[in-house]
Image (spheres, helix red, strand yellow):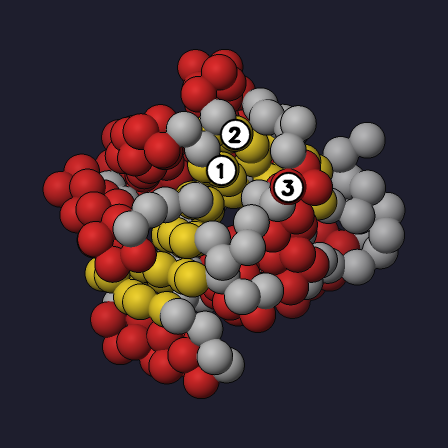
């Protein structure tokens, strides 16, 4: 994976940002994407200051034209696409099923599911032509477990894991690997919003056998590994990085 070209969606905060830093530190060329140009350009300056080649492309993964342009711009800039980390996601609107609406469903599924689907469509288009590549989707412990008060988010992450396994089978003979990384409770802004209060966050920690939150950097290291030659015979897998929560 020497000097691979890495594309990361949802790269401006949390796990996506940590992954961008980790890939850059390992010597790879990085394209970061998100919806906020100021934050994107600031991240690129930071990555370049560390000696990495980096570009920002503004994109909204819910819009196919944006996703197509993002992938095409990556290839125009660096000539290929080796690794794609589909990290863009939203916690949506937590709450009981009786409070959910078609709008709250769409707000979550359009980013978490449609965004992954569109990203994979265009990433696979390029990678199949190359005969090589790695796609890593970011799921969650809630991609294979239930959670009261989070039915829409949980459903969206179950969908991500199902799509990951299916596309891995589609692409298995093409030289393209497709996997998911499923974080447990990780100390990010999204988790703070999702839990709502310090008490709720502390209660969530008690469900983790290792008795702490994960760090974005720990997830980033796992993402770099699953994209590497060290994981060359792994595809269609969901890697749980959750302190023992999925047991």
Q: Crowdedness of circle 3 by 10 Å Cα count: few (<14), some, many (20+)?
A: few
Q: CA distance from mark 1 to mark 2?
A: 5 Å
Q: Quadrant of the C terminus?
A: top right
Query: Where residue 105 appears, x then y in whole percent?
Result: 33, 33
69 lies left or right of 80: left
Q: Crowdedness of circle 1 by 10 Å Cα count: few (<14), some, many (20+)?
A: many
Residue farthest to the bottom, as pictured: 49
Q: CA distance from mark 3 to mark 1?
A: 10 Å
Query: Where residue 96 appears, x then y in whole percent?
Result: 48, 35
Task: Kindly indicate the quadrant of the structure image that contains residue 182.
Answer: top right
Give the mark nearer the N terminus: 1 vs 2. 1
In the rendered image, the vertical position of residue 224 relative to residue 174, given as above or below: below
What secondary structure is found at the residue carrying circle 1?
Answer: strand
Query: Where residue 99 appears, x then y in whole percent?
Result: 38, 36
Residue at coordinates 77% horizontally, 40% vertically from top-left? 245
Disc 2: which residue: 177
Residue 59 appears in view: no
Q: Crowdedness of circle 2 by 10 Å Cα count: few (<14), some, many (20+)?
A: many
Q: Nearer the viewer, mark 2 or mark 3?
A: 3
Residue 81 appears in view: yes
Residue at coordinates 56% horizontally, 32% vertically from top-left? 179
Disc 1: which residue: 134
45 lies left or right of 175: left
Disc 3: which residue: 229
What secondary structure is found at the residue carrying circle 2?
Answer: strand
Residue farthest to the left, as pictured: 65
Give the mark nearer the N terminus: 3 vs 1. 1
Query: Where residue 56 appears, x then y in whole percent?
Result: 29, 66
Marks 1 and 2 in Cβ contact (< 8 Å): yes
Viewer-closest of 91 and 69: 69
Marks 2 and 3 in Cβ contact (< 8 Å): no
Residue at coordinates 60% horizontally, 52% vertically from top-left? 224
């Amino acid at each position: 994976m020497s000097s691979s070209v890495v594309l990361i969606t949802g790269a401006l905060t949390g796990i996506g940002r940590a992954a961008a830093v980790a890939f850059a530190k390992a010597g790879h060329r990085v394209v970061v994407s998100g919806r906020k140009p100021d934050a994107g350009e600031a991240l690129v300056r930071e990555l370049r200051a560390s000696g990495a080649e980096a570009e920002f492309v503004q994109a909204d993964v819910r819009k196919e034209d944006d996703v197509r342009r993002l992938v095409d711009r990556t290839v125009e800039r660096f000539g290929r696409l080796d690794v794609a980390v589909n990290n863009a996601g939203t916690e949506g609107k937590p709450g009981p099923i009786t409070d959910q609406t078609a709008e709250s469903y769409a707000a979550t599924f359009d980013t978490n599911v449609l965004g992954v689907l569109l990203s994979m469509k265009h990433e696979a288009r390029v990678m199949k032509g190359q005969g090589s590549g790695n796609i890593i989707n970011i799921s969650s412990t809630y991609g294979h477990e239930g959670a009261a008060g989070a039915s829409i988010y949980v459903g969206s992450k179950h969908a991500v894991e199902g799509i990951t396994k299916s596309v891995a089978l589609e692409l298995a003979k093409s030289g393209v690997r497709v996997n998911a990384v499923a974080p447990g409770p990780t100390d990010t802004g999204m988790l703070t919003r999702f839990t709502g209060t310090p008490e709720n966050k502390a209660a969530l920690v008690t469900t983790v056998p290792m008795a702490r939150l994960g760090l974005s950097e720990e997830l980033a290291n796992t993402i770099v590994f699953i994209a590497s030659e060290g994981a060359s015979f792994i595809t269609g897998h969901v890697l749980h990085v959750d302190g023992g929560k999925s047991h």
